[in-house]
Each structure stands twice: as structure tokens, then as C-alpha cells.
Image: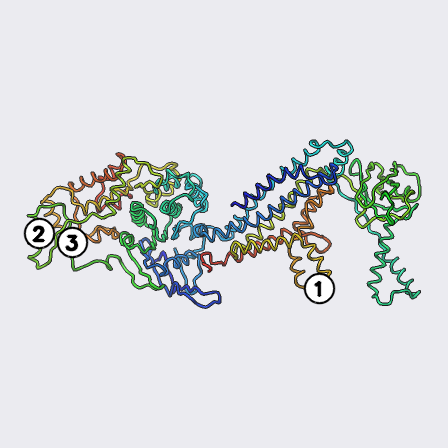
Amino acid sequence: MEYAIETFSLTKIFSDWWGRAKVYAVDDLNLQVRSNEVFGFLGPNGSGKTTTLKMLLGLLHPTKGRALILGGDGSDPKINARVGFLPEESYLYRYLNARETLDFYGRLFGLPPKLRKMRIEALLDMVGLKAVANRAVGTFSKGMARRIGLAQALINDPDLLILDEPTTGLDPIGTRQIKDLIIKLAKRGKTILLCSHLLADVEDVCDRIAILYGGRIQSQGQVRDLLQQTNKRQITTDAISDATVAKIEQLVRDENAECVVTSPMDKLETFFIRTVTAAQKKAQPTSGAVSTTKIGDFLTQPPAVENILDKLVAAPISPDLSDRGPLTEDVAADTVSKSRPDEQLLSKLAGSSEPGQPGIAGFQEKVETEAVQTPTPESEQVNKDILQRLTGGPADQNEDGQETDNSQAGSSGDA
Amino acid sequence: MKVALVSLLLLIVILPVLGFSATGDETLKGRLQTFVSYSLSLMSLLLCVLTIIISVYTVTSDIEQRQIYTVITKPIRRYQFVLGKLLGVIILDVMLLALFSAVIYTITIYTPSFTNASEAELIQAENEFFTARAALNVPEEDVTEEVLARYEELERRNELPPDETREDIIAELTKRKQLAKRAAEVGRALIWEFDNVKPLAETMFIRFKYDIFPNPPDSQVYSLWLAGDDQYIKYGEQPDTPVYEQSHKHAARTFHEVEFPSDVVPEDGKLAIAFVNIPPNEAPVIFPLDGFEVLYKADSFGANFVRSVFSILLRLIFLACLGLMASTFLSFPVAVLFCLVFFFTATFSGFVTESFGYLSENVGAVYSYTLERVIQLLPQFDKFNPGKFLVPARLLSWSELAKAAVLPPWWGFDGDMVFVKAGLLLLLGLLIFRFREIARITA
């Protein structure tokens, strides 16, 4: 199998001025990242994550061993053309404004002017900086700089995206957006190396993870395999009546198993997003980044069509299905019981212990709620309502809402 | 970059002030010479320092502030990064140079109309400043045979100084003989002959400086200058062409010029010029080394000015390459210091190498095989100083510029290879940068 990233006993020793070995930053690292997977590279501060990335990209020379990305050398321009890189902080040219910054990076890739312009506008839209696109990036807050950093990493529509702590400094909406973006890109066959110590982020999106400590891999594998509690089951329902709960408890007890019934808490992330979106809907002015739910069109088009579209389309196409809203919605629908009790639904749900949705291993919510409910018309309706509340967006977003449910959220972009 | 702003402001303020305050020797020509010389030197110095700082800063700040992480990981090669920076610095230099030299040129051109100079002064400025003149080659007279003859004569007479080597005596004799060739007793003439002279302009100029011993009380030297067919000057044969013949009075020990029409140049191109030491002079008149030249107008002041500015650009390009080279392996302050040392050594390289000559023999030998060789690798900025050409209104030809840019200083080319040296530095920098660990944090 062709690996997107492969290292062979990669070692980096930082030595002092006299050449004495001081720090084993990376120690005999053998890492394999398959094509088309989201790989989480975890570890505490100073565990060698960033050093590894720098060696992959040719910014540092390995003391020993070898690193291949996309089957080649990290300093080869042919390889670089297919890689997007977001360093641990966004190091930008302070006096360029957001649009000029992206234009600069676009030129480095030799993108033709028309395509460059189209992508820049799409990306600015996506990272929510269109309104401040003419402000020097030196005046940006850390989170806004982060957004521009992400946009520059995506301007070449990379096959391999290397993200070093992509969510630091970002507000929850931005974080959520990046996570959703990662999932969409993975669906389009991109490979993503996500380097982070924010476990929640990694857990949400990664197929496989490796945990690094002291420059060595301590643990590696499928997220689901590593985290799944096979001795437990969890059922989430709408707000059902106490009588039904009692019935269920009885059923469970019949199997000699423990059963705990509580009302799940809203995730703070969900709550935050809801609040901010409501404020945005009221069009309160902000001088910061605007949280959008858009993802650059060129990033979500199927690969085959992409080139032609890039060439043909001067302006961004009709608002694409790719709405972030639906996803966050799912979370809300999962955890918040808002719809009216429906015994029929419950029995249906209880009956069908369908396993996880295809292809979305990354969703934290899904991993946790192992047995998932198949959405019914009722829940879909609810979704749509919340969706409309969340996405202050106009009517065009309804379409998205309608076709959205847990299992489809990620795939809507391909529609 | 505040540094850039400060230098630019300095220039903007100082140039016009200089234009009004520079007076020179109180003549219009002196005033113009002083202004052009000072303003060009000032501009050159500031732009040189600015170029060093900017070229070093542009790379080191990218590395220190890590913008280079996202640039160098894009599909460009490392050499493209450095060459791109070089191009940027050069474009900036060209723009600043164009701006400031335009200011200097404008002030220079309009100075005559702002001063109430006399008609004579205006003509003098026109002839001796607002022009670009080339010099006829003054053939060096070969005195070797006479010196050897004299030496043998002294040897025969046993009058050689006992404690000196033959080389020293020969050198001393040569010096004396050459001096004698440039000296004229009262009533005697000095004749210079030129071959293949073409009447290149309407008028030609004799530029000269007298030494006279003992000095007359009023320091004035009386002279008769002749120019024309060599057969007439030497043997009195009647020529087909007119002859210039005019007596003058000039102060000793400063440069003066005598203008003569170029139709005195005979058809065969054999021009002779004679100086006659006439009464009331009471002492021999000596022309110091480089104290005699024949000049003709070869180009306009404007064109010469542009080429002088190019010669400044030449050194700016060199310094940009130097700065980039230093910044590929040094941090900002160290690289700037390195470049400044380099720059000042290059600026005073003539003085520095000359001073080695005064060291005692043992120390001198050590230096001449180490430091002097190193200094010879540097460009010699003082050799192609633009003021050196514009002040005496001397032609700085394109070939002279090319000589400074690419030709070597040996094999009689007397060039400076500035471009070659810059290229080598740049190559070295690219090589270092190619293998540098960009993300290496150096404590």
C-alpha cells in the first residue's frame, strides 16, 4: 500500500555548540500514514510532534533515518505543490492584507490569475474574513491569523494537508468548522496529518492516531478500537415519558444489566455555537472574524470535475450544500431532547440497533453513541428548525437542512 | 523599516540644503563641483548602508519570525527564495537611486540660474563642468636608456653612492629624469606629441597645473601655449592648418584650462602641444605627475551623470549580494556588522593597501601575503568613485563601467570585477542556504 507519509527510523538529535548530543527530539520514529486517512499525531508539549513535521517538510534535516511524503522528498517542489502546511502559529507578513497574503501564496504555487482570484474569494468566505480582507494581517487577532493560515494551506487544494495545532486560538465555531472541513477533505480522498494535543479535536475527526512521548510512539491505532468500551451500550432518545423509561429499565434488568437514566447535558460547544449564531442572525456588528458555515467550493467538488470547474467558473458557484450548520445540528439533536415524546419512535429505535454510519468514523458523537437512531421524519423536522435558527443564513440553506441527518451530514458536500 | 524612512528623510532634507550651502571656491564651477561631489557621496553612502541593512533584514527576519516556514514549503526552490529577495532589493535600489539622482541632477542643472554668476563663470561652468570630456593619452617618455647611460657614467666616474643598491639608484635616477622631462627652464619649451588625434569636438582643452621653484611673490606663472601640426611646433615648417598660439598668466599649484579650437589638429592626426616658459618668470616651471592633460568633449553631462549613477548601482548590487550571503548563515546584527566591515574596507581599500607599504619589511611581508590578498578580493569602490569623474567633468564611458563590472584588475585591464565578485558571494550564499536547516533554533 502506498503511504502518504512514511518515516524510517527517523531520528533528530539537537546538539549543543560543541556537538554534544543534548536532546533526542525524535527517536527512531517509524510512522505510516495511509493515503486518504485522517491521522492524529498526539503528544504533550515537547514530545517531538513539530520536529517531526519539520523534518517531513525539509525544514530540518534528520540526524538519522528518512522521511517520505507523497512518496518523495519534502523539499522537492513537485511534492510541495501537492502539500498544504499550517505551522504551529500563523507566521504572516504583517503589512500584507488578508487578500494580498493569499494572493502571495497562490502565486508561489503558480496558480493562474483567474483561478487564484476565485479560490481566494472562496477561501476568504470560508474562513469568515471577507469583511476584513483589506486589513493588514498584522492587526489580526491570533484566531483571525489562524484562519488566514488555514486558508493559505488550502489554496493549492492539497492532496496532503499537514496541520500543526490547527485549532489553537480559534473560537469554538472556527474549531468546529476546521473539524468539519477535515472530514470533508478526507471524503474527497485527501490525506490529513493532524498534529495536536487537544484531544477532543483529534477524537472528533481522526481515523487513526499515534501518541508520541519523548520522541517515540507510545501507542498507535484506530481511534474506534482504542476508545470503544465494548462492555457498554448507550441509548439516546427524545424526551420520553417516565412510564416508558420504567419499561426500558425493566427490560434491561431482565438482562441482568445496570441501567442509568439521565437527561444528557448540552455540550458547551453546541451551546456556544447556538448563542453566537443567534447574535449573528441579529446582525450585531463585529470587527472580528465572521463565523461562516461555508467551505470553499473548490475544496468540496469531486476531484474529477474540479479542474474544469476551476477553469470555467470565475465566481463562486451557487451556495454549495457544504453547510457546517447541519453537523453541529446533529450534535444538538443527539443530545438535546427537544422533540415531543414518541413511543413509536422509541420502540423503533430500540429495535434497530444499527451500527455506526458508514465512513464517518471520526464523529465523536457517533463513536460515543454506538447504537444510533435512524432519523425519522419528526426528528428531521426538528433538525431543520434548529438549523434555521443556527445558520442565520437565508433560504438557500434550507435545502441543506432537509437533506441533513446524522448519517448524511458529512456527505452532503458530494451531492 | 524605520531605517529606510530615516535615511530617505535625511536625503530629502540634506540634498536641497547642500545645494544652497555648497560654495566651493566661490565660483559657479566650484559650487557645482562641491555640490555634485558631496551629494553623490552622501547618497551613495546612505543607499549602501540601507542596502546592507535591508538585504540582511529581509532574510533574517523571515527566518526569525518564521514566515519562511510557509514560503519555503511551497513549490519553490531555496535559490529562488534568495534570488527573489535579491531582485526585490535591487528593484528598491533602482527606484531610490532614480529618485534621488533625479533630485541631485535637477538641483545641479538649475543651480546656475539661481546664482548671479558672471558671464565668464557661466561659460567656465559650461566648458569645464556641464560636459563629459575624455583625455588624449599622454605618451609616457621612455627614459630607461638615458637612465642606464647615466648610471654607467656615474659608475665610470666612481660617483655612485656607496651604501645603496643598484635598483635604488636606478629608481632614483628614473624619478629625476622623468621630472626633468616635465620641467622647463626660463626661455625653454616643453613639447607633447600625440598620434592619431581626430578632431572630436569643436574645441579642445589643455588642463594643467604648474609647480614653480622658487615661488614668485604673486605666485603667477607666465606662459606661451602653442597647439598645432607637430612639424611646425618642432621644426617651424609652415603647416596647412591653423596654429593656436597664445600667452597666458595663471596661478601656480591649481588646475587651469586653456581652450583651443580643434581645427588646429592636422590631417595626419599628429598634434603637438608646446608650453614655453617666458619672462617675467624667473624660475623653471615643472608639471607635476598628472599635471598635464588634453581634453575634448566626448559626451553630455547628462549622459555622464547617468553612467555615474550606474556605477553607484553597481556597488549597491554588490552589497545586496553580500548582505544576502551574510544573512544565509548569520543573525541580523552579526550579518550587518560583517557587511559594514566589508563595505568600509572596500571603500578605503586603496588607502588600506597603500598603508601596508609603510609597514616595516618583516611585518609588511606577513601582511602582503595574507591581509592584502584578502583585500584585493574585495571590490575597490574608491577606484570607481562617481565624484572622481563628474567633478573634473571627465568621461565615464560605458566601457569604463563594464571594466569595473566584469574585467579583472590584472593583465592590464585595471578592472574591478564587481559583478564577478558579487556573483561569487551570491553563489556561496546559495550554497550555504541550500543546506541550511531553516527551522533550526540557535540559542
Residue B62 located left or right of residue B385: left
Real-space Cα distance between discs 3 and 1? 92 Å
- Report, in whole angstroms, how far the alpha carbon at label 2 lies from the one at label 1: 105 Å
At horizontal 88% and vertical 62% (from top left) the residue drawn is: B151
- Using the image as rendered, state which of residue B387 and residue B435 is in the foreground: B387
Which SS class for mark 2? helix
Which quadrant holds residue A228?
bottom left
Q: Disc count in the image?
A: 3
Q: Check the image and report above or below for A232 versus B46.
A: below
Asked whether B392 or A322 is in front, the reply is B392
Residue that numbered label 1 is attached to: B364
Chain ID of residue with mark 2: A
- SS for dot 1: helix
* Amino acid type for the residue under numbered disc 1: Gly
Q: Nearer the viewer, mark 2 or mark 1?
A: 1
Q: Which percent across, then down, holds residue B439? A: 44, 57
Estimate the x, y position of residue B140 in percent, counting from the top left: 82, 51
Residue B161 shown left or right of residue B52 in the figure: right
Q: Amino acid at mark 3?
A: Gln
| Left or right of A142, for residue B253 | right
Asked if badges 2 and 1 are on one and the same chain, I answer no
Residue A248 is labelled as 2
- Characterize the local packing of mark 3: few (<14), some (14-19) or many (20 or more) Cα atoms within 10 angstroms: few
Point out which mark residue A234 bears. 3
Badge number at residue A185: none
Residue A295 placement (x, y as % from top left)? 32, 43
Assess disc 1: are there few (<14), some (14-19) or many (≥20) residues with their C-alpha within 10 Å of its C-alpha.
some
Name the subunit of mark 1. B
Q: Quadrant of residue A340?
A: top left
Disc 2 to disc 3, C-alpha distance: 13 Å
Q: Sequence-wise, which precedes: disc 2 or disc 3?
A: 3
The disc labelled 2 sits on which kind of residue? Ile
